[in-house]
Image (spheres, rainbow, N blue to C red):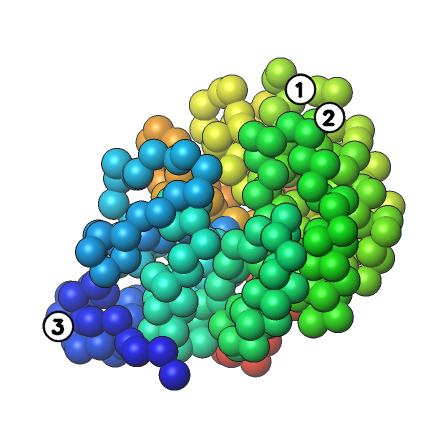
Amino acid sequence: MRKLLPSRIYWTPSFECSDDGAIVSALQSTTAREPLHPVIDAHVHVWSDDILRYPFCPHDGLSHPAEEATINDFYASAADANFIDVVLIQPRVYGFDHAYVYDVADALRGHARVVPSVNVRRDRATKELRELAADPLTAAFRVVALGDAPADWLSWPSAHQAWETAAELDLPVDMLIDACQIPLVEQVAAAHPDLTIIIDHMARCTPTFQPEYAPPLYHLAKHSNIYMKLSAVDRLSEGEFPFKDMWNLMAGLYREYGPSRLLWGSDWPHLQGAVTYRQSSVPIREALPNASEHDIDALFTKTAASLFGFNPIEIAKNE
């Protein structure tokens, strides 16, 4: 059993509470608010302000973050949202050291899952996957091809072994890719139909500058093992809130994938400009004005619950 984090890292809304009790208080303070539909945030990054205990160790030359993004900061920013559970995506500033995200998820007592990073170029990737999958907090694993345009390693023997192992373990892979790498993902999906693939940030398609990538992204929908994460909308847009230049793309993804293969993530703390946490889901709702309540429920809650192993009974209690 992982050791709980010290109480000082927790955000307590209005009173002092020790250890994991403060997290429970924070959860109660957010989920009790009415205005928004209950959500599972499928894409959140957190890092500690205790760099001695949790040192940064980026593996891709990424600079250390200037902003603070502890779990306390996240709960403070989400305090006016009807927030249920969270999926903690391993931040690249920690490389392959997952200590902080697992410690946080452990302290959140069933309200969080972890998506650690795995380097599928290494022969020992299959062993790492089995070790990670043995932890009930592990919901999926992340592969980062962003910035590596060729990314031919997605088809290396070590990668194929990783895909086969992940399919065997029923462990989805969360892919951070560039739009130009869509064909490579399709090759993986076709070769491994039992592997669940989640594509982050709509493959970083920017309709203003890359309209040619929307059709290939829609085309991927023919592979039933591919899911699309509607996230980082503000970062991909060239406009102001509510980012109308992204609406057609999201409406197209809704049409092609259906709500049961779409999920929402805030990409906190990487919200741009004056966009608040609560506002981060608004562009999707605006882009899908004719979506039924059932579809909205799937997109913001049920698809993520199914993919990442959250308890549907507990979710129902919060609705």
Is 135 drawn above or below residue 69 in the view shown?
below
Reading the image, the residue beneath label 2 is 213
x then y, percent, for residue 249: 68, 31
Reading the image, the residue beneath label 3 is 16
Work out whether residue 58 or residue 11 is closer to the camera in this orientation and state it: 58
Front position among marks 3 and 2: 2
x then y, percent, for residue 87: 49, 60
Quadrant assignment, res 302: bottom right
Reading the image, the residue beneath label 1 is 210
For the image, the number of numbered tags is: 3
Question: Quick one: SS at disc 1?
Answer: loop
Q: Are marks 1 and 2 in contact (CB under 8 Å)?
A: yes
Q: Are marks 3 and 2 in contact (CB under 8 Å)?
A: no
**Is 38 displayed left or right of 62 in the figure?**
right
Quarter the N terminus occupies: bottom left
Cα separation between marks 3 and 2: 50 Å
Of the image marks 3 and 2, the number of the one nearer the N terminus: 3
Q: What residue appears at the point 74 percent right and 59 percent down from the top-left corner?
A: 161
